[in-house]
Amino acid sequence: MSTTALQRPEVKPMMPGPAPVISTARLTLRPHRLSDAPAIAESLSDFAVTRMLSRVPAPFDRQDALDWLVPVTSGTLPDWPLAITDKDDVHIGNVSIELHHGRWHLGYWLNRYYWRRGYMSEAVVAIIERFSRRMPETPIYSGVFADNPASLRLQEKLGFRMTGCGEIYCFARNTMVSHIETVLQPGMLQSRKVA
């Protein structure tokens, strides 16, 4: 018997297809463009935003934004990184569902000047609802830094449940940070409770 016969076939996860454009009452979620670089750099040059993100360096500038945008706009990734824009197409943040280590993960950030208006709740509900239509049996993983109670409350209101705690490295803070891991099981989105 050859070793080829003993190898298991590689199981590839289902893919959701290309990232959509999603309209909500106040927002449009759309694929990013290279022209979004200045707005992304402006938002992520604010340490109040980047300190809550694990993979974003500080300081963050236009070239960092372009370095991120080139692969994101190439159309070769299975991920759904969507620009959060207002009705005038002003880029105010990002909401994404990305494939990491075989699991789909929710991530998001918003320019600080748009906080506390319910925009992030609106964007997260919209992307999860659309993703769940394409991938109905797929859990969505996420997490928050332990010192980000607002983000944890948002996830809990949506139906995410805590699955564990650990530490992950935060580039902006240049240190390990306590991290709460969460998951939203299929069919458990509670969009009506979020304001």
Image (spheres, rainbow, N blue to C red):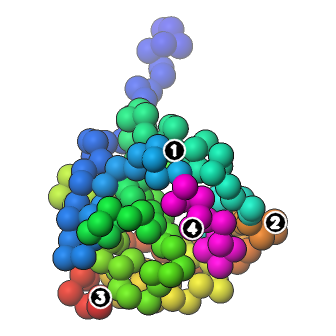
Q: Quadrant of residue 161?
A: bottom left
Amino acid under disc 4: Ser
Q: Secondary structure at mark 3?
A: loop
Q: Nearer the viewer, residue 155 or 71?
A: 71
Image location (x, y in percent) of residue 58: 74, 63
Q: Is residue 173 left or right of residue 131?
A: right
User: Residue furthest toward the right?
Assistant: 175
Where is mark 3, residue-wise? 194
**What kind of residue is marked 2?**
Asn
Range shown magenta:
38-51
- The residue sitting at 25% across, 51% down in the picture is 20
Q: Main secondary structure of the magenta part?
A: helix
Q: Nearer the viewer, mark 4 or mark 2?
A: 4
Reading the image, the residue beneath label 2 is 174
Residue 45 forms part of the magenta stretch = yes
SS state under label 2: loop
